[in-house]
């Protein structure tokens, strides 16, 4: 195939999906000798449009895994995509538990919107709830595998035919979203939980700028004017460490994950 341009397109609240997507896409562009373009749709402003893709483009498309699926808050935007025959490499990250059906769902979304997903990968990133679970990932070994994916995808593009990549996961209608439960088996519902703000806050408004839902008040950064998706952006990027959770269900689930998934989560490449 004659690829004239490589795109990386991603949603990445805390930077882990961005790091993987940039590594895969950068490697792909370098090996193909093609220019690299970037579309970041993490913030609301990035979801006001999309690139004009062509059948001579290759797109590395990244999202995190939320509750085992593509984040449902992104589905409305993803439904506006038009691939126009562009080759695609869907990439997901997950916080060391499992990526469940997120990769097969992302692959299907891209295929249904005119892309040709021919290679894919599932990578591990530090969990959005934690600085312990998969701490420091993606690390050097993960990035080496991301470069491998980019290199092998470039080799695949040298051929004439691109078949739909087979990935792990349950085909449509997929499994339900992962549901945390307490020790008695009762569902733990944290959908309406939002971070609190300590007296350490100096109203620098970094949290306002990084919230992917635009949900933090510029006038009073301790107030949430919209939904909180527990992405971790405001907590992890606050220079004063002023954002935190105290909800018992949230803290139970966080501890359960940290204690139950200490093993090194596996990166999987599909080609």
Image (spheres, rainbow, N blue to C red):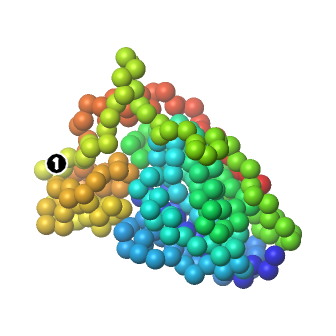
Q: Residue furthest right?
A: 159
Q: Position of residue 14 (x, y in %)?
A: 42, 56
Q: Which residue is drawn at 50% across and 69% down?
A: 80
Instruction: Name the secondary structure under disc 1.
Output: loop
Residue 123 x, y percent position in the rendering: 60, 49
Please, is residue 18 above or below residue 132 in the view?
Answer: below
**Residue depicted at x 59% and y 51%:** 105
- Neighbor class of circle 1 (other Cα within 10 Å; few <14, some 14-19, many 20+) is few
Seen in the picture, residue 186 relative to 250 is either above or below; the reply is: above
Res. 221 visible in picture: yes
Figure quadrant of the N terminus: bottom right
- Residue 58: percent from left, percent from top: 68, 72
Figure quadrant of the C terminus: bottom right
Q: Looking at the picture, does residue 230 appear above or below residue 7?
A: above
Q: For this view, does 86 lie left or right of residue 73?
A: right
Front residue of 252/119: it is 119
* In the image: residue 18, left or right of residue 193: right
In the rendered image, the residue lying farthest to the top is 184
**Residue for point 47% across, 36% down:** 178
Residue 98 quadrant: top right
Foreground: 239 or 153? 153
> Which residue corresponds to the image point at 25% horizontal and 57% vertical from the top-left?
226
Q: Along the horizontal axis of the image, is 201 left or right of 259? A: left
Q: How many labels does the image show?
A: 1
For the question of whether residue 134 can be seen, the reply is no
The outermost residue toward the front is: 173
Between residues 168 and 40, which one lies in front from this camera angle?
Answer: 168
Tell me if 245 is positioned left or right of 80 in this view: left
**Where's residue 10, x and y in %?**
52, 64
Q: Which residue is identified by label 1?
A: 198
């Amino acid at each position: 195939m004659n690829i004239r341009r490589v795109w990386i397109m991603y949603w990445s609240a805390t930077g882990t999906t961005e790091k993987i997507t940039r590594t895969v896409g950068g490697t792909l562009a370098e090996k193909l000798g093609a220019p690299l373009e970037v579309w970041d749709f993490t913030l609301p402003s990035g979801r006001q449009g999309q690139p004009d893709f062509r059948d001579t483009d290759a797109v590395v498309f990244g999202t995190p895994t939320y509750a085992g699926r593509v984040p449902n808050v992104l589905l409305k935007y993803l439904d506006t995509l038009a691939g126009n025959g562009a080759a695609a490499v869907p990439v997901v990250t997950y916080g060391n538990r499992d990526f469940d059906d997120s990769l097969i769902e992302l692959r299907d979304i891209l295929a249904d919107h005119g892309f040709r997903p021919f290679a894919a990968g599932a990578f591990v990133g530090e969990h959005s709830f934690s600085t312990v679970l998969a701490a420091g990932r993606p690390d050097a070994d993960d990035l080496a595998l991301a470069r491998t994916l980019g290199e092998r995808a470039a080799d695949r593009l040298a051929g004439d035919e691109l078949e739909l990549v087979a990935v792990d996961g349950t085909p449509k209608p997929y499994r339900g979203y992962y549901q945390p439960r307490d020790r008695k088996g009762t569902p733990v519902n944290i959908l309406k939980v939002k971070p609190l703000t300590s007296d350490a806050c100096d109203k620098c408004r970094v949290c306002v700028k990084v919230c992917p839902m635009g949900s933090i008040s510029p006038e009073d950064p301790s107030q949430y004017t919209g939904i909180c998706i527990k992405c971790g952006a405001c907590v992890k990027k606050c220079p004063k460490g002023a954002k935190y959770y105290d909800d018992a269900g949230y803290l139970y689930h966080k501890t359960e994950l940290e204690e139950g998934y200490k093993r090194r989560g596996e990166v999987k490449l599909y080609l």
